[in-house]
Amino acid sequence: MIDPSPALLRVENLSVAFKQGDKEAVAVKDVSFDIYKGETVALVGESGSGKSVSALSILQLLPYPLATHPTGNIYFAGEDIFRATPDRLREIRGNRIGMIFQEPMTSLNPLHTIEKQIGEVLILHKKTRRISVREHVSELLKKVGLDRVEERLGAYPHQLSGGQRQRVMIAMALANEPEIMIADEPTTALDVTIQAQILSVLKELQTKQKMAMLIITHDLGVVRKVADRVFVMTQGQIVESGKTEQIFRNPQHAYTKHLLASELKGTTALESPESPVILKADDLKVWFPIKRGLLRRTKGYVKAVDGVTLKIKEGQTVGIVGESGSGKTTFALGLLRLERSSGRIIYQGTDISELSWKEMRPLRAEMQIVFQDPYGSLSPRLSVGQIIEEGLRIHQSGMDLVRRQKIIIDVLREVGLDPETQDRYPHEFSGGQRQRIAIARALILKPKLIVLDEPTSALDVSVQAQIVNLLRDLQIRYKISYLFISHDLKVVRALADQLIVMRNGKVVEQGKSSEIFKNPSTNYTRELLSAALNLETSENTRIN
């Protein structure tokens, strides 16, 4: 069937249903939108609204036969690709339609180097000669702002930070200069300065190649900055669409108004001078040896964390900010003794620096972590209920089943999830919902310290506010201390009372959050704040 429409991509009355035993759940219902050459269209909505499912349907990447399409047609350049053969789809995927996936850790092959994975795309689709692949890969990585490119070529995905992995995914998608780029939360894991850089790169390539873009995002600042038209989704349906300025200035649907009005409110909890210090680190270092030669001798070190000192009081939130690769997450792993480190770590008056793995185990219940990548940190073989229950089974093994079930139900409600979903598995949830599951898993033991590694990066704006308010309430109620790692300075400002700014493994600025936001003392901090405020300003001007 030939589509007479001049649109480069046209989605017509698309519906998506998922089989759940004998039942069928409709995730997307009668969705229609189109994209023209050189245009940027944004699909906006909260987690679970059907944005990603609609985008994955375009390239038929859903788990068939569990997923079905009761209705719909999808046309690309006039061709009905919904009914294309597998061979024809392979020609289109990655070559004419590129895709940046939301979960870089699960999309990249853990057994292959970065050079090999991007090079494979060039060899298969562009027929690039192997001897020139390295040069092409280096150019792509430089375009997306990856530093120390020559060193990164031989790295594996687990050796990169979340933001660096996301940039590798963008480089892979751009490799074949596609006609359409589908970007599923392309800047979610990136710090504010790199967000601006990546958006600029995408816009520049779009102009040069007349490439169309479909951006799926919850970040209204990104939408305002890059999109020509917006389609707003909720509960599997498009409820409003139009030009970006029109939607932002004069929203018509109640749900659109709700999204635009969502913002982080409230202030950080007041720090008490009498509060005891719960965790202290002196001159913490995490160095990774660089081994070369046949005998793999150590020739130097990657100084991921180089002499960082901090103090966290009971009920206090310390925020750590900095660009991807600055050492934020590595520092947190070193503090929790999940990464080999040197320096003193004092937890509640006890030096834990030299404790064995077995000696550390009883303290794990009191020192929890919410990882940056919820999909990679949740077992695909366990249901949500089993994942959340696991901590109770290990650390409170004497608790009976009825009591455990009640606690699971309570914590699911606390993070805004339906307790009825506890028998489902992680792959059945959206990215934002998976992040809430990870937070629930950490909260269930009511620990004294929680390391939050980008806990709101995958969440839409209204759920961000909900999670921040939840974390603040729990902190006051249970006197929990937080080490809050984030590139989102708006979230940090709303939650952290102390702030550490890191760059290249070192602390460049440290002190009260309010003072640093008002009067940063270093150029690097000023650059971070300036980039964040530019995105925030573009978002806030929507209602002026």
Image (cartoon, rainbow, N blue to C red):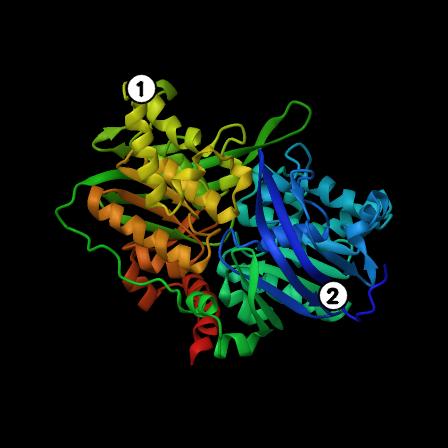
Q: Residue furthest left?
A: 274
- Comparing 147 with 166, the one in front is 166
Tell me if residue 302 comes above or below residue 82 in the rendering.
Answer: above
Write down the residue under mark 1.
397
Tell me if residue 510 comes above or below residue 134 in the rendering.
Answer: below
- Give the residue at x 83% y 69%: 4
Tell me if residue 531 comes above or below residue 325 in the rendering.
Answer: below
Q: Quadrant of the C terminus?
A: bottom left
Tell me if residue 175 comes above or below residue 527 in the rendering.
Answer: above
Q: Quadrant of the N terminus?
A: bottom right
- Comparing 48 with 18, the one in front is 18
Q: Position of residue 270 (x, y in %)?
A: 19, 55
- Give the residue at x 34% y 65%: 517
- Comparing 44 with 362, the one in front is 44
Write down the residue under mark 2.
211
Residue type of the residue flagged with mark 1: Ser
Give the left or right position of residue 314, taking residue 406 as reference.
left
Residue 11, image quadrant: bottom right
Q: CA distance from mark 1 to mark 2?
A: 56 Å
- Comparing 499 with 480, the one in front is 480
Q: Which mark is residue 514?
A: none
Q: Residue furthest front?
A: 22
Pointer 1: residues within 10 angstroms few (<14), some, or many (20+)? few
Q: Earlier in the sequence, mark 1 or mark 2?
A: 2
Q: Secondary structure at mark 2?
A: loop
Q: Position of residue 382 (x, y in %)?
A: 49, 28
Residue 196, image quadrant: bottom right
- Give the residue at x 70% y 50%: 172
Q: Position of residue 26 (x, y in %)?
A: 58, 48
Residue type of the residue flagged with mark 2: Met
- Give the residue at x 35% y 22%: 394
Is residue 98 in view?
yes
